[in-house]
């Protein structure tokens, strides 16, 4: 299955790490955003099937993106990939509708397991 | 651009390594204080000697500063400064859950600082296949003079320093703590070499 993927992270290295970890079927239509505001602009105007979202970012952070998606009824699977591994943060993002919380740096096997769990593999 | 300047990619890579380390240090702090720690995007800047102490002065709204040296392989070394704001020192014992008289204020603040510094730097070192050793943490008075004197006593060249600033905000208690890492001139080149190795994999 092919999908439109959006990777949102303020770090170029982190965006590359996620991109390189994606399975082949999710690697064809990938867009990149460097902060939450850019991501929301894309999400409001284009069809995106899956969002990989960092939390600690300038302009609008990951929690801000999740809240905006909820407020604007934009429904898509969001996988948060963050270094902020506090249990309360993981609970917050899941309560805001994220499908899963993955720790940075991204581990290929864990990403694949989550994608499989949510029907993308 | 001089030999000590970081390229955009090098700065980005260093920032991401710091993000991961900061995340795990904040998790430790959150568990230690049984609360939630709010994180901001860390700042990284190069500071010349003539501006280093001015730049620190801007950060020094602190009443207490704990300084701890770190030393890794491949010449990666520097000084970590943990800075606490005046109003926070009074409630630190409550935050840490100590009984009255159990530990002195100096011992409490050194305790907390050491956990933050070593957690952060151990995670940072692990990501670059390195390992850190630490000097004993030392409590300095929150004055520029005392920090200046302390830094000048180190066998580092501070003509140029890489300054990394990380803010930990404990919102439940309005408690803030800033960690400032100062990496001396000779170590910047070594960090650049390590970063280039990571970037080469991408």
Image: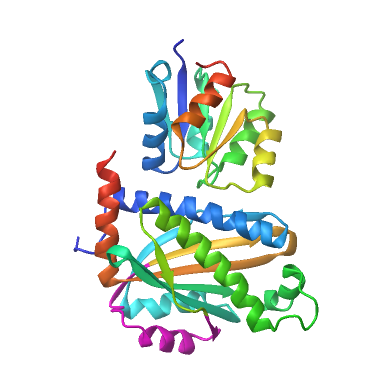
Residue B94, placed above or below residue A91: below
Is residue B146 in the magenta section? yes
Q: Residue at x 66, y 77 (%)?
A: B108
Task: Tell me: A58 left or right of B103.
Answer: left
Which quadrant holds residue B132?
A: bottom left
Look at the image and name its color scheme: rainbow
Query: Most extreme residue toward the left, as rendered?
Result: B2
Depth check, front residue: B104 or B7: B104
Task: Tell me: B33 left or right of B136.
Answer: right
Depth check, front residue: B122 or A58: B122
Is residue A79 in the magenta section? no
Quadrant of the frame with the C terminus of chain B: top left
Task: Tell me: A80 left or right of A89.
Answer: left
Q: Residue at x 52, y 86 (%)?
A: B143
Q: Position of residue B105 (x, y in %)?
A: 68, 82
Q: Which residues are magenta?
A: B138-162
Q: Position of residue B55 (x, y in %)?
A: 42, 75
Depth check, front residue: B142 or B78: B78
Q: Position of residue A69 (x, y in %)?
A: 63, 29
Residue A2, placed above or below residue B90: above
Residue A82, placed above or below residue B138: above
Count of numbered marks? 0
Q: Residue at x 63, y 48 (%)?
A: A86
């Amino acid at each position: 299955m092919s999908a439109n993927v959006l990777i949102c992270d303020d770090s170029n290295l982190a965006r590359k790490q996620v991109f390189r970890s994606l399975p082949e079927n999710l690697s064809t239509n990938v867009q990149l955003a460097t902060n939450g505001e850019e991501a929301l602009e894309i999400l409001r105007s284009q069809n995106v099937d899956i969002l990989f979202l960092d939390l600690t970012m300038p302009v609008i952070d990951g929690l801000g993106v999740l809240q905006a998606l909820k407020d604007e009824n934009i429904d898509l699977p969001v996988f948060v990939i963050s270094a902020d591994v506090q249990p309360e943060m993981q609970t917050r993002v899941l309560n805001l509708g994220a499908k899963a919380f993955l720790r940075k740096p991204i581990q290929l096997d864990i990403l694949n397991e989550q994608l499989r769990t949510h029907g993308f593999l | 651009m001089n030999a000590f300047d970081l390229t955009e990619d090098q700065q980005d890579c260093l920032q991401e390594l710091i993000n991961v380390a900061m995340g795990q240090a904040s998790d430790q702090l959150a568990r230690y204080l049984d609360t939630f720690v709010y994180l901001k995007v860390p700042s990284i800047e190069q500071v010349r000697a003539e501006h280093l102490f001015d730049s620190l002065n801007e950060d020094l709204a602190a009443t207490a500063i704990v300084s701890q040296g770190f030393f890794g392989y491949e010449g990666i070394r520097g000084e970590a400064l943990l800075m606490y704001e005046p109003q926070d020192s009074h409630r630190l014992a409550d935050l840490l859950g100590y009984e009255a008289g159990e530990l002195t204020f100096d011992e409490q603040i050194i305790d907390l600082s050491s956990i933050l510094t070593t957690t952060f730097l151990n995670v940072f070192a692990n990501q670059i296949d390195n390992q850190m050793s630490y000097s004993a943490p030392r409590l300095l008075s929150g004055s520029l003079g005392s920090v200046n004197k302390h830094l000048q006593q180190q066998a580092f060249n501070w003509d140029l320093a890489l300054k990394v600033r990380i803010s930990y905000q404990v919102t439940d208690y309005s408690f803030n703590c800033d960690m400032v890492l100062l990496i001396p001139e000779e170590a910047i080149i070594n960090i650049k070499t390590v970063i280039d190795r990571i970037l080469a994999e991408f």
